[in-house]
Amino acid sequence: MKTALLVGCNYPNTPYELKGCINDVHAMRDVILKRFNFDPQHVELITDEPGSPKMPTRANIMAGLAEMVKEAKEGDVLLFHFSGHGVEADMKPGRKDDAIVPCDLNLIYDVDIRHLIEQLPKETSFTIVSDSCHSGGLIDKEKEQIGPHSTLRGIAPSVDTRKRGISLESIHQGLQTAANVINAASEVLGTTVAFSTTGLDIVSNIGHLLTGIFRDN
């Protein structure tokens, strides 16, 4: 079975507001349904657009991930896509942890993701596509990773972190649309994949729809 959790955070009406992240996850949903035969009943979309029945808080995102992992069986394919802010936080003296930022600013750390991965049955594919700063540490040292651990410094949750981008040198040429992202991820299914953002930006437009994939907003 193929299961996906797609999360987009624009952080509307906050100092951290982004544009395009919600469109990112809608584009991703279209791609996995049309090109990779995911069942719509097994694809959950969580965004912070006004009127959303479920907001992408830490609790809701972690509950969605936990449910995917709980139901996973050998041979299943799991996909988690996050589009939004990422930060590097000081957890202990001399130690920095990477995290993604839900809409309630209650961080999800790399250790949270790793704890879930450790619970997966053998031969289960768990793919992470993270379009956010400092996302590389979510999966550092996994078997497959497109893009290195971010080396940026000085970005904290209290700082305006509206810049999201991806280094051209850190990824394979051509990863400029949601379709290409998923196509790249499909080449390494059976492993964990993520994108870190370390500098140069790519602006991507799908048709005339503004998206935030790998762009500086």
Image (tube, rainbow, N blue to C red):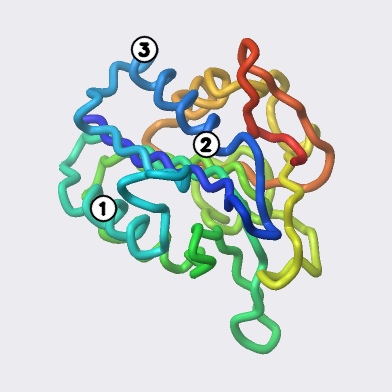
Is any part of residue 76 visible from this angle? Answer: yes
Q: Earlier in the sequence, mark 3 or mark 1?
A: 3
The 10 Å Cα crowd at callout 2, few under 14, some 14 to 19, many 20 or more, is: many
Seen in the image, is 5 located left or right of residue 40? right
Of pointers 2 and 3, the one earlier in the residue sequence: 2
- Residue visible at 32% across and 50% down? 54
Taking depth in this image into account, of 43 and 187 the one nearest to the observer is 43
Q: Which mark is residue 120?
A: 1
Given the image, on which type of amino acid does mark 3 rest? Lys
Query: Can residue 192 be seen from the camera position used here?
Result: no
Q: Position of residue 195 (x, y in %)?
A: 61, 42
Of residues 181 and 16, which is closer to you in this image?
A: 16
Q: Say which residue label 3 marks.
A: 34
Q: Which residue is mark 2?
A: 22
What residue do we see at 53% from left, 48% from top?
Answer: 9
Q: Quadrant of residue 154?
A: bottom right
Q: Nearer the viewer, mark 3 or mark 1?
A: 3
Please provide percent x and percent y for residue 93: 67, 89
Amino acid residing under circle 2: Ile
- Is residue 149 left or right of 194 when viewed as pictured? right
Q: Secondary structure at mark 3?
A: helix
- Mark closer to the chain start, 1 or 2: 2
Q: Give the Cα separation between the discs numbered 1 and 2.
A: 28 Å
Does residue 143 lie above or below 34 as drawn? below
Tell which tag, 2 or 3, sits nearer the viewer.
2
Residue 161 occupies quadrant: bottom right
Task: Give the crowd class for mark 3: few <14, some 14-19, many >=20 residues within 10 Å.
Answer: few
The amino acid beneath tag 1 is: Leu
How far apart marks 2 and 3 lie (CA) works out to: 19 Å
